[in-house]
Image (cartoon, helix red, strand yellow):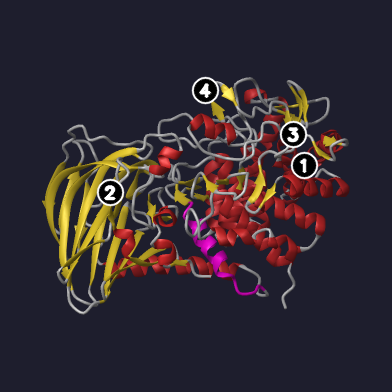
Amino acid sequence: MCIEFGREICGILDSAESREWLVTNGIGGYASGTIAGLLTRRYHGLLMAALKPPLGRTLLLAKVDENVLYGDKIYPLCTNRWTDGIVSPNGYQHIERFSLEGTIPVWRFACADALLEKRIWMQQGANTTYVHYLLRRASQPLQLTLKAMVNYRDYHGSTQSNGWKMSVELVERGICVTAYESAVPLYLLSDRASAVPAHNWYYGFDLVAERYRGLSDREDHLHAATFQIIINPGESLTFVASTEKEPNLNGETALKLRRTQEQKLITLWKSSRSSHAKETPAWVNHLVLAADQFIVDRPRHDDIHGKTIIAGYHWFSDWGRDTMISLPGVTLSTGRSEIARSILRTYAKYVDKGMLPNRFPDAGETPEYNTVDATLWYFEALHAYYRFTEDDDLLEELFPILVDIIDWHSRGTRYNIHLDAADGLLYAGEAGTQLTWMDAKIGDWVVTPRIGKPIEVNALWYNALRIMANLARHIGKPHQEYDAMAERTLVRFSRFWNQEAGYCYDVLDGPDGNDPSLRPNQIFAVSLSESPLTPNQQKAVVDACARMLLTSHALRSLSPDHPQYQGQYGGDQHQRDSAYHQGTTWGWLIGPFVLAYLRVYKNPAQARQFLEPMANHLHAHGIGSLSEIFDGDAPITPRGCIAQAWTVAEVLRAWLVTEQLIAPL
C-alpha cells in the first residue's frame, strides 16, 4: 500500500492542510508541516532543532516559500493563510502529487508542462534539514526562488516581532542567522543557488489548529534571505538548514544515506521475524519506519550512547510510562533489542524510592515521580526483552533494582503508594495528585483522580510479581516470597469483579467507595501475560469493552452511558483536558484489546481485523504514522499528537503476535 495523493486531496485546501508530514533526526529534533505547505500549528517548521538533545527544541526555520518563473508566468508553490482569513499565495493548487518515500515527503508541482519535484528529510544525529528540488520535466529552463522564513523560539511558544533585529550575514554558499548574541547560529546554505540577505518580518501567519486548541493563533516570521537559481531539465538544487557550519551540501549523497538507513530498518525487521512469516503488508512497513522516529539519544555522563523514546510529536518529550509501554513494540517488535537494552539501563539509573520518573529529567532538573504505573510497566518491558534475548547479564545487573522496587512498594513510597496488608492489593493516591495514565489535571482539579486501588495498577502489580518470581528462577535467586505475594494478590483480586454489572470495578476502596465506571483499564487484567481473572471473567471483560468502548480506532476512555462522557475533544485547555479521559478514544489501547480478544477467542485472524482501520488511518492526520487520540463519537476524528509512540508500538506488537499465530498457507 503506497501512501500517495493526487489532486483529489492536494488540490482541496481542507484536505491538504489536515494531513501532516513528519521527519526526525534521532536526537529529538524534527521537521513537520502540512501537505498544502501552509502553517497550521506553532509546532510546524522545517528545522525544529533539539539544542539540548533530546530536548531544548527550538524553531529555527519556519518555512521556505518557493516561486517558479517558467516562460513568462510566475507560479507560486507556497501557501499561506493570514490572520484576516485570506489564503495567499495558493501554491497548493499546483501540487499534482504528494507521496511518502519511506518517511520522506515528496511533492510534485505542475507548472504548465514543467514538473518540479521536492523532497524533505533530516540528517540522522544532526540538527540539519535538507530540501531538495529536481526538475523532472520541462521544455525550457525555469527560475526557482526561495524565501527563507526564520525564527528563534521554544517550540511551545509563538513570536510577535516587536522590532526584533537578528543578525543576517553572508557566508560561503549562503547566509548565517544569529537571533541574538548567545543564540545558536543557523546556517542556510545551498549547493548551487545564489543567496541575498534580507530582514523583512512577515506578520500574521494564521494558525488554525492552535485556534481549535484554544491557544494563540497568530505568529510572525522573519524573511532572512532569498535564494535563486536557473534550473535546466534534469538538474537539481539542494537547500540546507543547519546548526552546523559546514554540513554536507551534496543532496544526492545525503538522500542516499537516508534511504539506506531506512532500508536497513526494514531489512532488520524482516530478518527478526519467523522464516514462515508472510510478506509484510506495506502499511506495516510504514509503521516500522514510524517507530524509528520515536527512538532518540538520551546521553548521560556515564553512557553517551543512552537511548529513550519520545512519547509523541509534536509536543511530548520522553516520559517514563510512555517509554515502558512503547518499548516492546518500538524496539523488540522491530528487531532492535540493543535499543531496548540501552533504554532499560538508562531508566534504571533514575529509579528512586522504588519508582521510575514520570517525566524524564533535563540537565539540572529534578525528576518528577508522580506515577504509580510507569514502574510496573518497567517489569513488563524487561520481561519482554528477556524473552526476546535471554540476556542474563542485563538481568543480573538490574535484578537488585527490581528487588528494591518491590520492597519500596510493599512498605510504601511516595503519594501514599503502598501494599494494603489486608488484601495484598496496591493502594495509590492522595488529594491533588494524578498517578495513573489517566492523568489530566486542570489547576488544582484532578479530572480522574482514581485514588484507591486502580484495576490496571493491580493487574500490573500481580503481573510484576509473577515476572519477578520467574526471573529469579532463571538466575538462581530466591523466588518463593514473590510467588507467595502473587498468590495473595490473585486471591483478593476477585474483589474487582462487579457481579451485578458483569465486568470489573475501575477502582476499589476510593474516597467514595468502589467505582463501577466502565473504563478500558480492566482490559489489562486480560491482556497482560499473567491474568488474575477467571476465563469466564476474561470473556465478560472483553465483551463489555467491545460493546461499549470499542471504536474503529481503539477503546474509548469512558462508556458513552456514563453521565460524564464527552465524545468530542477540542477547545481550550480546560475543555480538552476535561474530555481527555472522559470518552476520548486512545489509539494505543487497540493493542491490549486485540491481545485480550485473542486470549479469549483464540482466533488470531479475527483478532487482527481490529487493526485494519489503522492501515487506513496512515493516510490521515500524521501521514505514515498513528495518532494519539480520537473523538469518542463518530466519525472518530483524529486529535492530539499526529504521531504517538505507544499507538504505533501497540499496533505493531499486536500485529506481530497475530502473525505468529496465523498458520502459513
Query: Which residue corresponds to mark 2?
Result: 61
How much space separates mark 2 and mark 3, taking CA atoms?
47 Å
Q: Which residues are magenta?
A: 277-294
**Local crowd size for mark 1, using a 10 Å CA cut-off: few (<14), some (14–19), many (≥20):** few
Q: Is residue 286 above or below residue 632?
A: below
Decide which of 189, 221 is in the foreground and name it.
221
Query: Which residue corresponds to mark 3?
Result: 517
User: Left or right: 167 with respect to 24?
Assistant: left
Query: Which residue corresponds to mark 1?
Result: 478
Q: Is residue 472 above or below residue 352?
A: below
Residue 587 location (% of width, % of height): 60, 49
Disc 3 marks a residue whose amino acid type is Ser
Cβ–Cβ under 8 Å for marks 4 and 2: no
Quadrant of the snapshot with the C terminus: bottom right
How much space separates mark 1 and mark 2, taking CA atoms?
57 Å
For numbered disc 4, what is the local secondary structure?
loop
How much space separates mark 4 and mark 2, taking CA atoms?
34 Å
Residue 113 location (% of width, % of height): 26, 76
Mark toward the start of the polypeptide (3 vs 1): 1
**Local crowd size for mark 4, using a 10 Å CA cut-off: few (<14), some (14–19), many (≥20):** few
**Residue drawn at point x = 58 percent, y = 70 percent:** 281
Mark toward the start of the polypeptide (1 vs 4): 4
Q: Is residue 530 visible?
A: no
Disc sitting over residue 443 in the figure: 4
Disc 2 marks a residue whose amino acid type is Leu
